[in-house]
Image (cartoon, rainbow, N blue to C red):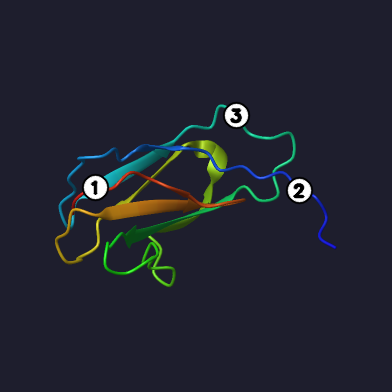
Amino acid sequence: PLAARDIWDPPVTSPTGGTVWNVGETQTVTWDTSSPPSVVTSYNGQLVLGYLDPNSPGEHLTLGIPLASGFNLTDGKVSFTVPDVPTRSSYIVVLFGDSGNASPEFTI
């Protein structure tokens, strides 16, 4: 049996729905750190880009090429360069640490 553990999935606060990023610019993703559990399994953060497609289930995450990794989840933000990806209005970012938490859809 698996041991019980606390899960912390801090809500992504930026980007918000309707945000537009441009390839090559520096962007900062932020999240709410106000309510961590008493025990956090991992403070090591990773941020990945994905997109939603109504014709294909899932979040289509680029797990092998994170936007950022190795940052502390308690920082509440991380900056990176927007990668060269196809234009679409259904991108999301997913913040991993203890658990994954996705942003609203936005455009690159």
Q: Residue at x 54, y 43 (%)?
A: 73
Amino acid at dot 1? Phe
Give the mark nearer the N terminus: 1 vs 3: 3
Q: Quadrant of residue 61?
A: bottom left
Q: Residue at x 21, y 41 (%)?
A: 19
Mark 1 → mark 2, Cα distance in angstroms? 32 Å
Q: Percent from the top left, x then y, of residue 58? A: 40, 64
Secondary structure beneath dot 3 equals: loop
Q: Quadrant of residue 84?
A: bottom left
Residue of label 3: 35
Residue of label 1: 106
Secondary structure beneath dot 2 equals: loop
Quadrant of the image for the C terminus? Answer: bottom left
Q: Is residue 32 visible?
A: yes
Residue of label 2: 5
Mark 3 → mark 2, Cα distance in angstroms? 16 Å
Q: Percent from the top left, x then y, of residue 101? A: 48, 48
**Pointer 1: residues within 10 angstroms few (<14), some, or many (20+)?**
many
**Pointer 3: residues within 10 angstroms few (<14), some, or many (20+)?**
few
